[in-house]
Image: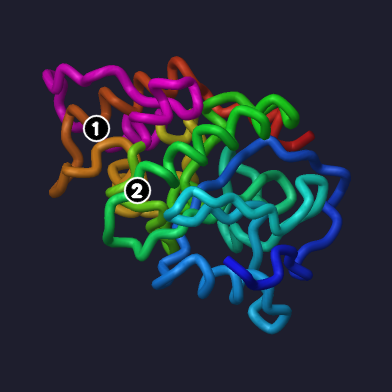
């Protein structure tokens, strides 16, 4: 990548907020150079703290202390302005292809340092689709969340027994405890949950969905106090 490696699209975090989340995105573009050009274009008014190319090259576009413009409208744990509460990482991917090993290796090298510097736990590493289910589907069903979870860089549910009945109220209650915005319709919350944790599941809510989100909510309830600090 030979284009400028800093973005003007940033500003101070609002209300003294500190990063408590890391939001993962895909670029949905043909190349890292194309994504870099957009992320550094003041007319586009979008940016991220980091861009990782499919070759594994990592560029920091915005200082971690600054508010990058990557998340847009949405919420997590009942809190909006996710830009002020997060570090944004863009992954060079067209939205349909697997994520190459060099990219994943670089992401696995980048995350621990951010998590340590910002005191972000594994449950604070989320998908763009988690906090904006009505608008976004990245990093998508092809992204290997389980691989990150095995290294303590994200979370993953225990294997559901799938013995219980589907229960919409229970699912939404537990989804709220985990962080999802349950003022949205059930189908949108369910789709966001499945994109990340059950990417091959389709159709109506099942007992396996309820069991998986119950496990996540019990072990990794969203830290609302940390998000609002």
Name which residue lies at 83% across and 53% down. Answer: 14
Q: Is residue 146 magenta?
A: yes
* Residue 209, label in figure: 1
Q: Does the residue at mark 2 contact the one at mark 1 (Cβ under 8 Å)? A: no
- Residue that mark 2 sits on: 100
Residue 86 x/y as whole percent:
67, 45
Name which residue lies at 77% across and 63% down. Answer: 10
Front residue of this view, candidates 131 and 6: 6
Residue 65 x/y as whole percent:
82, 46
Q: Is residue 76 left or right of residue 147?
A: right
Q: Which of the two labelled residues, at mark 2 and mark 1, occupies the earlier sequence position?
A: 2
Q: How many marks?
A: 2
Q: Is residue 109 left or right of residue 136?
A: right
Name which quarter of the figure residue 136 lies in. Answer: bottom left
Q: Is residue 48 magenta?
A: no
The magenta stretch is: 145-174
Residue 180 x/y as whole percent:
47, 41
Does residue 4 sit above or below 138 in this rendering?
below
Does residue 17 sit above or below 46 in this rendering?
above
Front residue of this view, candidates 102 and 180: 102
Does residue 68 sit above or below 179 in this rendering?
below
Name which residue lies at 34% across and 62% down. Answer: 95
Instruction: Check the picture and name the quadrant holding the C terminus.
Output: top right
Q: Secondary structure at mark 2?
A: loop
Name which residue lies at 52% across and 28% down. Answer: 123
Front residue of this view, candidates 1 and 90: 1
User: Outermost residue, front direction?
Assistant: 2
Q: Nearer the viewer, mark 2 or mark 1?
A: 2
- Compute the Cα span from label 2 to label 1: 29 Å
């Amino acid at each position: 990548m030979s284009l400028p490696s800093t973005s003007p699209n940033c500003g101070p975090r609002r209300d003294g907020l500190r990063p408590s989340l890391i939001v993962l995105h895909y670029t949905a573009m043909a190349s890292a150079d194309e994504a870099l050009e957009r992320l550094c274009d003041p007319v586009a008014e979008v940016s991220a703290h980091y861009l990782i190319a499919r070759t594994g090259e990592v560029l920091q576009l915005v200082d971690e202390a600054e508010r990058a413009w990557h998340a847009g409208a949405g919420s997590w744990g009942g809190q909006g302005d996710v830009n002020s509460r997060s570090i944004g990482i863009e992954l060079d991917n067209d939205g349909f292809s697997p994520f190459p090993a060099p990219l994943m290796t670089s992401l696995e090298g980048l995350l621990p340092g951010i998590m340590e510097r910002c005191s972000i736990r594994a449950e604070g590493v989320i998908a763009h689709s988690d906090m904006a289910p009505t608008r976004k589907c990245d990093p998508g069903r092809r992204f290997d969340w389980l691989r990150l979870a095995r290294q303590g860089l994200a979370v993953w549910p225990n294997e559901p027994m799938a013995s219980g009945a589907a229960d919409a109220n229970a699912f939404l209650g537990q989804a709220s405890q985990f962080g999802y915005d349950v003022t949205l319709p059930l189908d949108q919350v369910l789709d966001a949950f499945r994109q990340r944790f059950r990417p091959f599941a389709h159709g109506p809510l099942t007992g396996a969905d309820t069991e998986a989100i119950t496990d996540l909510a019990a072990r990794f309830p969203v830290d609302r106090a940390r998000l609002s600090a």
